[in-house]
Image (cartoon, helix red, strand yellow):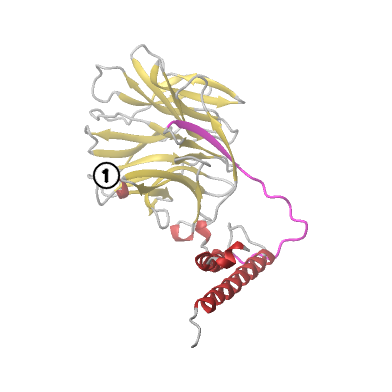
Amino acid sequence: MFWKNLPGTRLAFALALISIGLGALVSLSLPANATSQGYTFTTLDFPNSSKTFGMGNNASGDIVGYYVDSTAPFHGFVLRAGKYSTLDFPGDNVAWTQANAINDAGDITGLYSLKAPAPAGNVHGFLLTSDGKWSTVDYPEEGHTMSGGGYAIANDRTVFGCFHDGAPITAMFGYSVGPGGAARFEYPVAGTAFAMHYGATPDGKTMVGSYRAGGTGMDSWHGYMVSGGKTISFDVPGQLSANALGIRQSPDVAIVGTYKILVDKTWNQHGYVAATNGSLDPAKWDFTMVDVPGAAQTIVRGINASGQLVGTFFDAGGVNHAFLAVPVTAPAPSAPAPPSSGNAGLAQEQPTSLAVTAAVGLVLIVLGASALAATRCRRAPRAR
């Protein structure tokens, strides 16, 4: 072979064998929260739009979001049974509309803005019921720069979201408005809060969102979950700037959102799914990273009971597209699966595949070492 006459090439070949072998062995010890999960991804673009944003989905597979075209900054939309429908809050003084969440009954929430000139608090939350009735849903307190914005909706039509103060924003508060009344959420410290509700379970008893603490940079954001009267802060293990953007209630509680990576002074977003395994302790959660293939950035916004994900991705040209990610169903095993090791919620790898991986890794290391030794022998000076 030609490489036998090229010492530099022989050395590179030997080192490559050793490197690949070590890589195979290291892969056996990767933590559970670094595993990948298979999805079938579908791009969703509203017809004749320049940008499309996917925001939420429900148990029936209905999807809501918003899009950009030449007639308005944003229009809301719902995708139901393969058909797109535009959602614009009624009124001649409305500038734009965003649809952000849909419950299992088909009720939708989001936000809209009035045209300029408009009074302070020109951004409002809304409720669109399944029978077509629109209404404004703000936190019942006047004088805020942003009066309200709906980002999640429970099955009883309780709307969850945020309202803001200041321009630029100096304070951010989560809120809920529904049959049980209105509630204000301040976190991490009352009076200096900077937090907002992004998601809620269908029963409205558990909320997720994001808050800022310890600075004003992008790396100061963290996720939170409110459940059973407790607020749990969390970050994606090993990553910065977590946002919790959606949550499902059954068959098991799972949270979706984003984390950010600083690349050439730009924060790029990537998605995740966190299986809580029935625990309120983030250390016991399993995190799976999710990125649309070929995307520059991925934002996971919603998850339904079937595990289907909805969100937005940026292509290589920086254009926004919505996406649907459907979990790939694993084929049924031909033989009974081995007993579980007790790691509930983790995909168990077959012992045979582990053994094969280990064997291949060891063989490659031995071959590489032999080739390296042979290279050194050929380079050794002859005795005179």
In the drawing, does residue 78 fall left or right of residue 116? Answer: right
Q: Residue 181 location, x and y as percent?
A: 38, 34
Q: Is residue 89 above or below residue 312?
A: above
Q: Residue 130 location, x and y as percent?
A: 53, 24
Residues 143 and 345: in front is 345
Q: Which residue is mark 1?
A: 193
In the drawing, does residue 344 fall left or right of residue 138? Answer: right
Residues 24 and 44: in front is 24
Instruction: Describe the element under mark 1 as helix, strand or loop.
Output: loop
Image quarter where the N terminus lies is: bottom right
How many badges with numbers are in the image? 1
Residues 313 and 212: in front is 313
Q: Amino acid at mark 1?
A: Ala
| Residue 155 visible | no
Q: Residue 200 location, x and y as percent?
A: 46, 41
Chain part drawn in magenta:
319-342
| Residue 296 visible | yes
